[in-house]
Image (tube, rainbow, N blue to C red):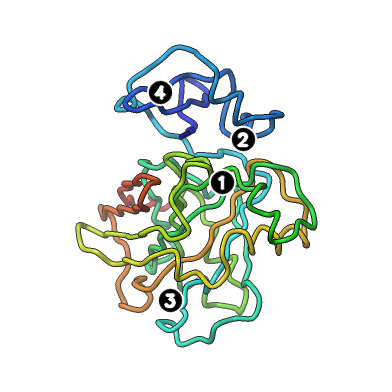
Amino acid sequence: MKLATIRDGAGTRAVRVDGDMAVELPAADVREVLDRDLWHDWAAGVEGPRRPVADLDYAPLVPSPDKIVCVGLNYRSHILEMGGEVPEYPTLFAKFRSALIGANDEITLPFATEQVDWEAELAVVVGARVRHVPVESAPAAIAGYSILNDVSMRDYQSRTIEWLQGKTWEHATPLGPWLVTADESPGPGRAIECLVDGEQMQKADTADLVFDPATLVSYLSTIVTLEPGDVIATGTPAGVGWGRGRWLTDGSEVVTRITGLGEQRNRCRAEARP
């Protein structure tokens, strides 16, 4: 099953994607769906007005998650690219919800930085409230998977040993288009790629992850209570701009794909100086 959050007039609405049609659900967004008891059966069974998928205006998949937790240095290929060593524990940082945009929205390039980078990532969306969940039980807490591009401002990121200041700039992180529920999503390996202006920059398989989704859910649930709609960005493979000395510029098109999870297509626009 595929679920999405779309813009609908002045607000948003959750929909179930059935082939080339989307069925409207009586919920404002995907997080509201996941907050329901037995949400999967409910979402699969609801019948409502239909609209063509081709006409959908995707909002961020989860517009207001309680948490957006990101994992750095989680692909072996990317660790080698950056000259690092495979970590013993996940490297964690966070984003704020103001960073999120829809799957086809414009990426804002801040005037304060000239080193804006792309990072294709598999996103895990939490579907249950859990704390201290063991690894073997963690898959049951995963609602499904989506796509996220952890667009990063590298000059700000490298100012200190903490990465937050390079990672959560406003209107710069596409999330979506869909949540593909865990029972239907491909795995454990998924092809992931990122193209910039038609040139392939990243191509890998999520099987290269150091810490897989279940391990991350278990680890994070030891630190905080995970809530329905929380987003975990699992890290990016090799091929980022930082390793090439190449950055996104005004007008660049970023295409991010993961097999079975769809595609994001985002145009970059320079922010006007105030």
Q: Is residue 158 above or below residue 109?
A: below
Amino acid type, label 3: His
- Residue identifier under label 3: 78
Task: Give how far apart the Cα atoms at labels 3 and 4 are.
Answer: 37 Å
How crowded pointer 3 is (Cα within 10 Å; few <14, some 14-19, many 20+) is rated as many
How crowded pointer 2 is (Cα within 10 Å; few <14, some 14-19, many 20+) is rated as many
- Describe the element under mark 3 as helix, strand or loop: helix
Proximity of marks 2 and 3: CB atoms separated by less than 8 Å: no
- Describe the element under mark 4 as helix, strand or loop: strand
Mark closer to the observer (4, 1): 4
Disc sitting over residue 98 in the figure: 1
Q: Nearer the viewer, residue 45 or 158?
A: 45
Name the residue located 66 percent from the left edge and 57 percent from the top edge: 217
Task: Give how far apart the Cα atoms at labels 2 and 3 are.
Answer: 31 Å
Q: Residue 168's x, y, as percent?
A: 55, 57
Amino acid type, label 2: Arg
Amino acid type, label 1: Ser
Disc sitting over residue 22 in the figure: 4
Proximity of marks 4 and 1: CB atoms separated by less than 8 Å: no
Mark closer to the observer (3, 1): 3
Q: Nearer the viewer, residue 76 or 56?
A: 76
Task: Give how far apart the Cα atoms at labels 2 and 4 are.
Answer: 17 Å
How crowded pointer 1 is (Cα within 10 Å; few <14, some 14-19, many 20+) is rated as some
How crowded pointer 4 is (Cα within 10 Å; few <14, some 14-19, many 20+) is rated as many
Name the residue located 41 percent from the left edge and 77 percent from the top edge: 77
